[in-house]
Image: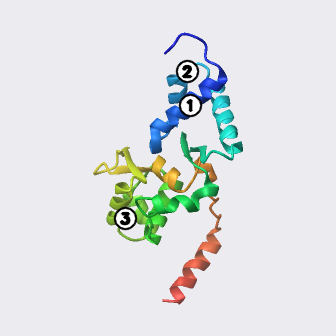
Amino acid sequence: MNEKKLSDQELTAIIQGLLFIAGTEGLSLEALATYLNLAKKKTKVEALISQLQDKLEADEGSGLSVIKLGDLYKLTTKIKHHQFYQVLQEQPITRLSQAALETLAIIAYNQPVTKTKIEEIRGVNCDGIVSKLKSLNFISEAGRTELPGRPFLYVITNEFMDHFQLESLAQLPELPNFSFEEEQEIYNYSDENK
């Protein structure tokens, strides 16, 4: 890289170029800071990213924006123009079954979690669903437990964060807290309706 000190305007242009090259993979703050030779100035890089976001959002002549999904920044199209881009999408948006959504929710709220635990919560075998979610790259294996058979532990991926447009898992809705009595009422109700 040229030794001359780059202006903030040049640095934001370089960030835009780096995000363009990275494509759908995106780049973390750490990666951007490293590429800009500003590894010790992550706060400055965050400020530059924020400037680029504001600039693109304000520019009516631009169809681009910078978003943060998970821990990655991505250059993407503006949401307000989404209807015009749908026709160019090569693949339709992945439609997930109720079973797949339930399994994803279990993993997101309990990660890392074994398939046995997922099946215990859902009450059914999850081999097919887990395989499908792995093939869609919504979940990944994150090592093995020390339990007998050393089962895999599953966690959600950046692809999951992307698909559901989440910046962090803290954005997931809070789960309701049931008292023991309320849970018993639910079980009794379902038993009566069999």
Q: Which residue is mark 1?
A: 15
Q: Which element carries disc 2, helix, strand or loop?
A: loop
Circle number at residue 39:
2
Circle number at residue 145:
none
Question: Residue extending furthest front?
Answer: 61
Residue 121 vertical placement versus 68 (above, below): below
Question: Residue extending furthest bottom?
Answer: 193
State the image coordinates of residue 147 (x, y, percent, origin top left).
34, 49
Which dot, 1 or 3, sits closer to the camera?
A: 1
Q: Amino acid at mark 1?
A: Ile
Do the residues bearing badges 3 and 2 touch, measured as CB atoms within 8 Å? no
Circle number at residue 129:
3
Position of residue 10 in the picture relative to residue 193 (left or right):
right
Q: Residues within 10 Å of mark 1 (few under 14, many from 20)?
A: many
At a point 65% along the width and 64% down the height, the residue shown is: 176
Marks 1 and 2, the one that precedes in the sequence: 1
Position of residue 123 in the picture relative to residue 4 (left or right):
left
Looking at the image, which is closer to me, 56 or 153? 56
State the image coordinates of residue 192 (x, y, percent, origin top left).
53, 89
At a point 62% along the width and 45% down the height, the residue shown is: 62
Do the residues bearing badges 1 and 3 touch, measured as CB atoms within 8 Å? no
Q: Amino acid at mark 2?
A: Ala
Q: Which element carries disc 1, helix, strand or loop?
A: helix
Q: Is residue 172 visible?
A: no
Q: Which element carries disc 3, helix, strand or loop?
A: helix
Which dot, 1 or 2, sits closer to the camera?
A: 1
